[in-house]
Image (cartoon, rainbow, N blue to C red):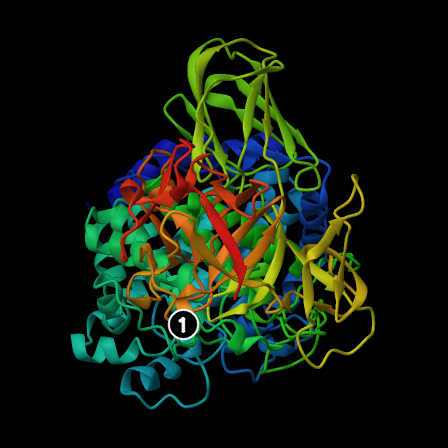
Amino acid sequence: MSSHVNRRRLLQIAGATVAASAVGPLSGNAAARAAALPPVRTDIGTGALPFDLGRVRLTASRWLDNQNRTTAYLRFVDVDRLLYNFRANHRLSTGGAAATGGWEAPDFPFRSHVQGHFLTAWAQSYAVTGDTTVRDKALHMVAELARCQANNSAAGFTPGYLSGYPESDFTALEAGTLKNGNVPYYTVHKTMAGLLEVWRRIGSTQARDVLLALAGWVDTRTGRLTTAQTQAMLATEFGGMNAVLADLHQQTGDERWLAVAQRFDHAAVFDPLAANRDALAGLHANTQVPKWIGAIREYKATGNTRYRDIATNAWNICVGAHTYAIGGNSQAEHFHAPNAIASYLTNDTCESCNTVNMLTLTRELFTVTPDRAELFDFYEQAWLNHIIGNQNPADPHGHITYFTPLRPGARRGVGPAWGGGTWSTDYTTFWCCQGTGVEAHTRLMDSLYFHSGTTLTVNMFVPSVLSWTERGITVTQTTTYPVGDTTSLRVTGEAGGTWAMRVRIPGWAAGATISVNGTVQDIAASPGSYATLNRTWASGDTVTVRLPMRTAVRTANDNPGVGAVTYGPVVLSGDFGDAALSALPALDVASVRRTSSTTLAFTATANGSAVGLGPFYDAQGHNYTVYWNTSGLTTVHLVNVASGLLLGVDRMSTTDGARALQWDDNGTADHGWEMVPDGDAFRFRNANSGKVLGVSNMATADGAAVLQWSDNGTADHRWLLLDQNDGTYKIRNVNSGKLLGMENGSTAIGAFAVQDSDNGTADNRWRIVRA
């Protein structure tokens, strides 16, 4: 299909409003929300879809406060100052506007990257709020970028080029001689993505035309390179060029853009991931994550499952082996060896861009695997504990921190190695994280709800209103979560008929309940799943979701004696005021107590003294610690009453899934189990492997294998001690209600442990002996 035909079709889809104006609709909120242009091509392989931004509205909450601060900045910032480098490079007058500083200074290598972020944020903000001030800023910038592009001949550039630095940087990039620190396609990606959002969300055909001309320039530039030249060029950071070009293919239906997108498939990164191999150590982290987003977008464009597998494996590897308790990843902007967490608790952990992009990847993966609840368990972990708190609530413009430091005694507000500083500013920083920050805080509502046919999925528990316009249904969510453990969802409008509502039950939420109009429903609500209400609805029906929370310790992958304290989804940090810390404080885990029913205020004993704990997203203006030394836990032997043998791990394995068994007391380290307090229960952490005792696949049936697994907070890792008043205990699994016992009641060395009903046999009782 030709580009000309695609444009005609898109104009027909968009309607007369867009066709009549190069800048799109100029009226208020309703017009803004109607202006989103649907893509010509439908994504392949999706099982759930998000709602348009204008359909979900945040209500009074911390999250809305974050959005409002960012909106204030977007309304304030001077477009002409942001245009300085583009105009100067394309030989146009800068109109007397002052240059900006930081990463947009006129001599900074990759200047002209942040403008694309602002275009995206303005477009998103308009879609959400209908604010014509932000819309007009976006349209003004697009008009001036069009002028820059139109002056290419006079500036000595080839048609379609658009940037704030000379085109010769691309020549040097292709030749392998670029040494000035520039990452040219990284900046082009930001511009293209911003133009695409202004076209789609505001309806600007001028943004479309500038975008298509720039994409054509990319096609011409990359189309003349050999495969070897292209792959060598891809060693330099290029943002999400594969993602934005795949999106352009979907939006227009033009196969040309898919071919260009696939030129940015970086084999050195994609090939190991396709083989499910972790080769991330040493790589610049945020260079990689946008490529993974591109992979899932290319899957949706082509149906090629290799792309889907690359993105899925990347997510699994990054979240499983490279992610801190707050949901962020990387130290000094780089990945390290798998599971290296406690080894890198420094001032330059958790670059904000990485997490924003991981949230995007998670959202994309959910649409193709909508039954995988752990995706949004991670999304909530990172969104709540990292991104919400990386904005400065004391700043009316909502400026952000580049890194979120995790060293003991750290304080939020740490700029990049290249430029330094603390928090971002109005005009003197313009780091990459400032750009993704204005994007993230104008779309905080984009993943709360999803739909598939007539089924609604509730993924996040945030005060909000969903307008399901296509069905005439409104869902109003009211909650104090995560301070409270309950949320209510009131369904009004044309709600009649039979349809399903799915609610995410987090992996940590044992004992969750779902009620309708005050009556508890008899439906499955297992941790780490979706509870489904399939019923005949009436307007006014109210669903109440209760997710009981408890304190727990999320241990570091590489050191079971180091951990972060969580309460439900919230990471708690210790408030040390202005005191300096030279090492991780030693925490008495059993001393952690909540002290308020209306706030998330806790107290504990650390280094022998009382310390206050609170949500890490609120840790502002004081020194804190997120991780603690928890190695002072009691280590015990679990001695089976029937056999007299000790519980250990098969072959002293340190891998997930290794089975628990009984063996002679021969002094091996796998016979030691640390008792980690977890509310009214305990987790048994193996002294040799650092893994915790759980049940295979969280099974609830008799005979299910008992094994060790990474401490990921699932309910099957929790065990209650039932004192038999004779020096022995029954050890009951919280998730299944079954007892720890031996397969077939065996007393033999090497017999495997299983869970069993409480049938009175001796193998279901244990002596707990200090090691």
Front in this rendered view, residue 34 or 681: 681
Which x, y percent locates residue 360? Answer: 45, 52
- Residue under the point 71% across and 45% down: 62
Q: Quadrant of residue 81?
A: bottom right
Position of 669 with respect to 120 (left or right) is left
Identify the element where label 1 is drawn.
Answer: loop
Q: Which residue is mark 1?
A: 667
Residue 42, placed above or below residue 541:
below
Q: Amino acid at mark 1?
A: Gly
Question: Is 143 positioned to the left or the right of 548 in the image?
Answer: left
- Whether residue 359 is visible here, answered yes or no, is yes
**Corner quadrant of residue 548:** top right
Place of residue 5 in the rendered image (x, y in percent of width and height, measured from the top left)? 25, 42
Residue 45 locus on image (x, y percent): 26, 40
Q: Nearer the viewer, residue 300 or 407?
A: 407
Q: Residue furthest front?
A: 726
Give the vertical position of 690 relative to 110 (above or below).
above
Q: Is residue 487 above or below residue 622?
A: above
Q: Residues within 10 Å of mark 1 (few under 14, many from 20)?
A: few
Q: Quadrant of the N terminus?
A: top left
Q: Position of residue 165 (x, y in %)?
A: 47, 79
In this rendered view, identify the residue nearer to me: 28 or 690: 690
Count the numbered circles shown.
1
Report the side of 748 relative to 194 (left or right).
left
Asked which quadrant contains residue 172, the reply is bottom left
Is residue 507 visible in the rendered image? The answer is no
- Residue at x-position 67% and y-position 45%: 63
